[in-house]
Image (tube, rainbow, N blue to C red):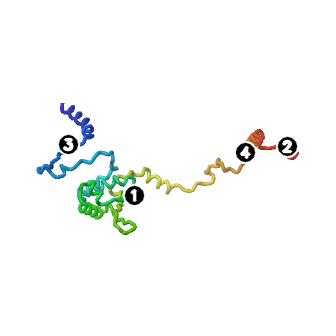
Amino acid sequence: MSTTYGLKHLIRTPILMQYAPYMQDEVDPSKPRRKSMVVPPDRNTFVKPIKQSFIKNPRLSPMTRIMLTLLSGWAGQGGTIETTVGIIGQHLSRCRRQVHRYLKDAVEEGYLSYSRTKDRLGYYTGIKIWLNFGAIRFTKFQKHTKQSEKTKEIRDVTLKSETNTKHIYNTEQDEELMETLARFALKAGFIDTRSSPS
């Protein structure tokens, strides 16, 4: 009975997650403040696989780790991220001062670098972020890397006798092919026999 109930529970869980959770209108003082916040809607956005060494790093604060994971999802294939501290704080439900602490924490650990952006009048418009993807994301290993380096060491330039001479730039003419092409050209009217000298 317990196994059957567990399977039914696992099957129903994705269905239940499609609906928005029940939210209370009034804040319950006996519960943490985060319990009264609005749950973000599911827009099928995702984050690429990240390294366990990044998740297990005890030097990072939990919210810095969440911020870096969110920025890794925003970056997509890579490149810079142009945003503002307020937008990051809005997605994390944190104030600007806390986001600045998270950015400072991530810079100290070498996970990102950022600079402030200005417009033509010199007003600050936001920040530009460069992520250290090698320390955050999982990258596939190149296959047969050692084998290819080994073949480069043991192989030398091929000798003239080992080269393939059957290519389109062969200097030797095929007489049978030239006669066949001449017959085709004569039938098609490309060669005028009347103008040829007798």
Residue type at the position of mark 2? Arg
| Badge 4: residue crowd in 10 Å (few <14, some 14–19, many ≥20) | few
* Residue 53, image x, y percentages: 29, 55
Q: Residue at x 20, y 42 (%)?
A: 22
Q: Are marks 3 and 2 in contact (CB under 8 Å)?
A: no
At mark 4, the secondary structure is: loop
Q: Earlier in the sequence, mark 4 or mark 3?
A: 3
Q: Residue at x 36, y 69 (%)?
A: 122
Q: CA distance from mark 1 to mark 3?
A: 39 Å
**Front in this rendered view, residue 13 or 4:** 13
Give the labeled residue for mark 2.
194
Give the labeled residue for mark 1.
79
Q: Earlier in the sequence, mark 3 or mark 2?
A: 3
Q: Earlier in the sequence, mark 1 or mark 3?
A: 3
Q: Are marks 1 and 3 in contact (CB under 8 Å)?
A: no
Q: Are marks 4 and 3 in contact (CB under 8 Å)?
A: no
Quarter occupied by residue 65: bottom left
Residue 133, numbered label: none
Quarter occupied by residue 19: top left
Residue type at the position of mark 4? Asp
**Front in this rendered view, residue 52 or 26:** 26
Q: Earlier in the sequence, mark 4 or mark 1?
A: 1
Q: CA distance from mark 4 to mark 1?
A: 56 Å
Mark in front: 4 vs 2: 2
Residue extending furthest toward the bottom: 122
Give the labeled residue for mark 3.
22
At mark 3, the secondary structure is: loop
Give the labeled residue for mark 4.
174
Q: Earlier in the sequence, mark 4 or mark 2?
A: 4
* Residue 79, image x, y percentages: 39, 58
Q: CA distance from mark 4 to mark 3?
A: 84 Å
**Front in this rendered view, residue 102 or 86:** 86
